[in-house]
Image (cartoon, helix red, strand yellow):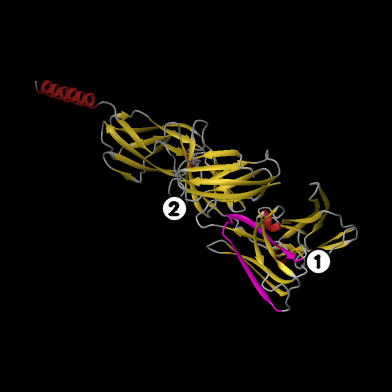
Amino acid sequence: MKYVYTLVIVLILFIASAQLAAAQGQTTIDIQPKCTLANQNFELTIYRLTGNDFNGSTTITINGQVFSVFVERTKAQIKIAVPANLISTAGNVQVVANTASGVSQGSVLSVVGPLSVTSTSFCGRTTLTAQGAPANGSYRWYNAAGQYINGATSASLSVTQAGQYAVSIVTATGCETARVPVNATVKPQLSANTEFARQDVTVGKPAVLQLNSEVFDRSHGASIRWEAYNFVTGARNVLGLTEAPKGGSASFQVPNVEANTYYEAFITAIDGMCYEEYMLYATTQGIVSLPVELVSFKAQSTKEGVQLSWKTASELDNRGFEVEASADGKNFRKVAFVESKVGTTSLTQHYSFLDTRAVAGANYYRLKQIDFDGAFEYSKTVAINITLASAATVYPTLATTDITVRLASTDDQVTIAVADMAGKQLLAVQNPADRQVVLPVQQLQQGVYFVTVTSGTQKEVIRFVKR
């Protein structure tokens, strides 16, 4: 009889155990993160939602590989260090837990990428380019401070500040992967003075043009293109291409000086050197000596505007000086007249004029010295680039295909408009998403144009020249 009692007890315990397992049911899990990059080490956390606790016999299977060694394990969660070589391609990967109650329901890990990012440095900016997002995914860029750059979701990002940036992939479900860092190096913008040496030339006779530039002094020049520009007909001819000197001046032989003609030089800098185009350009306009002996003519940027100052060593029948300004170094307009202090003298005289209407960008000035009998001659042309603190900028100021408008960081509601000399609006952009906006100008006719940046009650007008 005791064997019968023993059999009954064992049967009762078996039934109770089966009922308990049935009550507990299959283990269900969740994972974080729910997406990752291919070919990248990462840490995966598995959470137990229902079913048996995680214990010493629990294993985790990821993409067919079983893990029994964990970074951390509790009754409710397990952390695993997943090696980069486990998941090398994009797709969906099953994650399951093997517990006392059997194999759990699978949790899907979305794998995208691999994500690669490159940095290409240009003058004053760098373009960062990412690859690896799926067709229905996007990117998310972060600045050097680790802050998300609002609106930066495309595959490329143009930046003007050097530093370490980062990018991640965002899937169609909104899951964001780990960030991949990238270093941005920005080539600095250099400044230089470039001008022809002052000299007398005679129409119909040969002349040797001499070009001076700080670009040559630094051995930054690659070549020089010499051109003749007829300011009456507008015709332009390329005279030749020469190698830039490594120090000293460059010279070019003109066999026959033409009437109504300016001679111009365009320097091409060596790769890696960044100069604004107007700093690599010079014209012979106004290089003939004045009848008044002018020993200096300078332009200096101040808070109030552009301070012009010049000095004469002697004067003969001098009525005074017309101050002329230009946006392109070719088309000048009168902005003031400064009378001679003495008319005729052999003593040094000092003159000055403050141009309070100078705007951001390149400003060119020259003096038109006028005698009492009406005869006149021009001084050399001086150039100055006005950069306003926390102001918008436009480059290049001598454009062919497009211009870039760089907005101040404080701009919020912004309108960018491009107009011609008559004030006719040709292009407009309202509240751009990026602080740097590229505008096409290839379709515009050659001439001077104005970019107006309006932010609230503030308005900035910046000039550029379409070649």
* Quadrant placement of the N terminus: top left
Residue type at tag 1: Gln
Residue range of the region highlighted in magenta in the rendering:
347-372
Q: Which residue is drawn at 51% across and 58% down?
A: 389
Q: Is residue 421 shown left or right of residue 429?
A: right
Q: Is the magenta stretch mostly helix, strand or loop?
A: strand
Q: Is residue 335 shown left or right of residue 370?
A: left
Badge 1 is on which residue? 199
What is the tally of numbered marks visible in this picture?
A: 2
Tell me which corner region of the image, top left, top right, bottom left or bottom right, holds residue 72.
Answer: top left
Q: Earlier in the sequence, mark 2 or mark 1?
A: 2
Residue 275 coordinates in the image, percent (x, y): 66, 57
| Foreground pick, 139 / 277 | 277
Label 2 sits on a secondary structure element that is loop
Residue sitting at the far left: 1
Query: In the rendered image of this protein, does residue 95 appear above or below residue 434?
Result: above
354 in the magenta segment: yes
> Can you see residue 435?
no
| Foreground pick, 97 / 45 | 45
Residue 71 coordinates in the image, percent (x, y): 35, 46
Label 1 sits on a secondary structure element that is loop
Q: Is residue 159 shown left or right of residue 331?
A: left
> Can you see residue 24?
yes
Cα gap from disc 2 to disc 1, whole angstroms: 54 Å
Badge 2 is on which residue? 145
CB contact under 8 Å: marks 2 and 1: no
Residue 218 coordinates in the image, percent (x, y): 70, 65
284 in the magenta segment: no
Residue type at tag 2: Ala
Q: How crowded is mark 1: few (under 14 residues within 10 Å), some or many (20 or more)?
A: some
